[in-house]
Structure formats: structure tokens, C-alpha cells
Image (cartoon, helix red, strand yellow):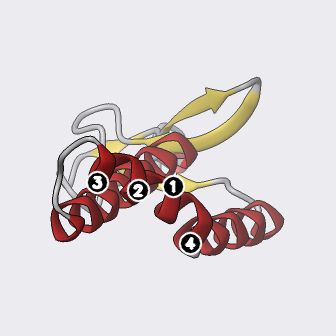
Amino acid sequence: MSEQRKFQARCASCDHFMVPRVVFRGGEPSHSICPFCGVQVKSFVSSEDAFAFGKALGRLWKMSSVEKGFVDSLVQGGFGAASAHRMFKVFKVALLVGIVYLMS
């Protein structure tokens, strides 16, 4: 194996030999990416962080008091109850997607 290839890996997405680039968030390494196609190669999120993240998502999904206030305010604003519940579900999914994006 050549000295140059010693530090390279083959990207599973674009099949190029590359040296992964490390992405930092808040001064900490977050993940590495392929410099050719930008696909994530490896995540550096610790299991402790992942556990805390999962716990936070579980709490978020069970926000019944927040849901009641959100739905009540929409109903008072002239929306039907079914529409207000659907809007809250969309809001929760959008919030989760945002959190997942920030964690990746």
C-alpha cells in the first residue's frame, strides 16, 4: 500500500478515494464528510449525547399540555379542532426535523 493511500478511505457513496473532512460544531468534532460528494462518513456523537437526545425527543413527543394550549389558541382563532390538531402534528414533526438537523 502506498504511503498516500494509507490515510485514505473509499467513499461508500461516490466511490472516490478520499481523506474525510471533519466538521466541528461548538468547538467539538461532530462528524466527517466526503470532500467530493459531501455525504457523512462517520458521526462522532457519543452514546451519552444520543441517549440525552432520545430522552428529549420522547418528552417532546408527549407534550400534551403544550398541544392543548396550541390547539385551544388555534380554535379560538377560528380554526376547526381537527385542523388545529393536524397543524400541531406538523409543528412537532418540523421541530423534530430541526433538532435532528442541528444534531447531525
Residue at (23%, 47%) from the top-left corner?
16
Q: Which residue lies at the image location 69% right of the left edge and 37% below the top edge?
A: 29
Image position of 44 (left or right of 73) = right
Q: Tell me, yes or no, whether the two marked residues, 2 and 3, touch with CB atoms within 8 Å.
A: yes
Q: Residue at x 57, y 34 (%)?
A: 22
Whole-number angstrom distance, CA of label 3 to CA of label 1: 10 Å
Q: Is residue 58 above or below residue 20?
A: below
Mark 3: few/some/many CA within 10 Å (<14, 14-19, 20+): some
- Between 72 and 33, which is closer to the camera in this rendering? 72
Comparing 43 with 85, the one in front is 85
| Residue 5 visible within the image | yes
* Residue 9 locus on image (x, y percent): 43, 53
The answer to which of marks 4 and 3 sits earlier in the sequence is: 4
**Mark 3 vs mark 1: in front:** 3
Query: Which label's residue is closer to the chain start, 4 or 2?
Result: 4
Identify residue type, mark 3: Val
Mark 2 residue type: Asp
Q: Mark 1 against mark 4, which lies toward the viewer?
A: 1
Mark 1 or mark 4: whose residue is earlier in sequence = 4
Left or right: 87 as drawn, with respect to 80? right
Under circle 2, the secondary element is helix
Contact between labelled residues 3 and 4, with CB atoms less than 8 Å apart: no
Counting from the top left corner in percent of width and height, residue 88 is at: 34, 59
Judging by the rendered image, the residue that carries numbered circle 2 is 72
Q: CA distance from mark 1 to mark 2?
A: 5 Å
Local SS, label 4? helix
The amino acid pointed to by label 4 is Ser
Q: Circle 1 sits on which residue?
A: 69
Residue ID for mark 4: 64
